[in-house]
Image: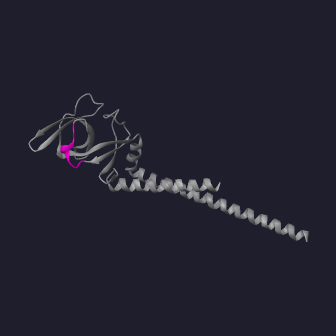
Amino acid sequence: MKLISNILYVIIFTLIIVLTLVVISTRSSGGEPAVFGYTLKSVLSGSMEPEFNTGSLILVKEITDVKELQKGDVITFMQDANTAVTHRIVDITKQGDHLLFKTKGDNNAAADSAPVSDENVRAQYTGFQLPYAGYMLHFASQPIGTAVLLIVPGVMLLVYAFVTISSAIREIERKTKALETDTKDSTMST
């Protein structure tokens, strides 16, 4: 029983730490955790299926040199000031000093209507994904999600502490009662 209790404690404590780090990272980065040039992105549409599905969490790496990108690479670019899109490069053209990328979602019938300027390219897909984990990240970026992901594990830890303390008190009472019974039995026999 003690082993199970210790394992449960470690799991809950680890969960609290991980969720706290995810929430802090999500909040500080404006919605998507980023570490060492890598960013986790939530997939919000099915345009890239079957490469990755809606609700997946994908890992993208910040682009340092757009000239290294090739036809077939999957990139994340800013479609407008607030919208990041992750699609595959289907063609690359040069216009003056800039590269223009024609992109297309794998699941879309046609290529995107406007070419993407190299200035709008932010990252390249690394090939790593976690199916359905994007839903949790998206939830964590919402105020209610932040509260739930911090409060629920905290409450679980408090419940665990209450159960542990109650169990310890019962054990002490049991030992005290046993000691009293032993003392009473030994005084009666003398």
| Residue lying furthest front | 68
The picture places residue 99, in percent across and down from the top left corner, at 15, 41
| Quadrant position of residue 187 | bottom right
Measuring 57% from the left and 53% from the top, which residue is drawn there?
8
| Residue lying furthest right | 190
- From the image, give the main secondary structure of the stretch colored magenta: loop
| Quadrant position of residue 79 | top left
| Residue lying furthest left | 96
Quadrant (top left, top right, bottom left, bottom right) of the C terminus: bottom right
Quadrant (top left, top right, bottom left, bottom right) of the N terminus: bottom right
Measuring 20% from the left and 43% from the top, which residue is drawn there?
68
Q: Nearer the viewer, residue 25 or 149?
A: 25
Residue 4 in the image: above or below residue 99: below
Measuring 56% from the left and 56% from the top, which residue is drawn there?
9
Q: Is residue 121 left or right of residue 126?
A: left
Residue 42 in the image: above or below residue 3: above
| Residue lying furthest top | 109
The picture places residue 115, in percent across and down from the top left corner, at 17, 37
The picture places residue 11, in percent across and down from the top left corner, at 53, 53
| Quadrant position of residue 71 | top left
Q: Is residue 84 left or right of residue 115?
A: right
Q: Is residue 11 left or right of residue 186?
A: left
Write down the region rendered in magenta.
Answer: 63-70
Measuring 51% from the left and 57% from the top, which residue is drawn there?
13
Q: Nearer the viewer, residue 175 or 75?
A: 75
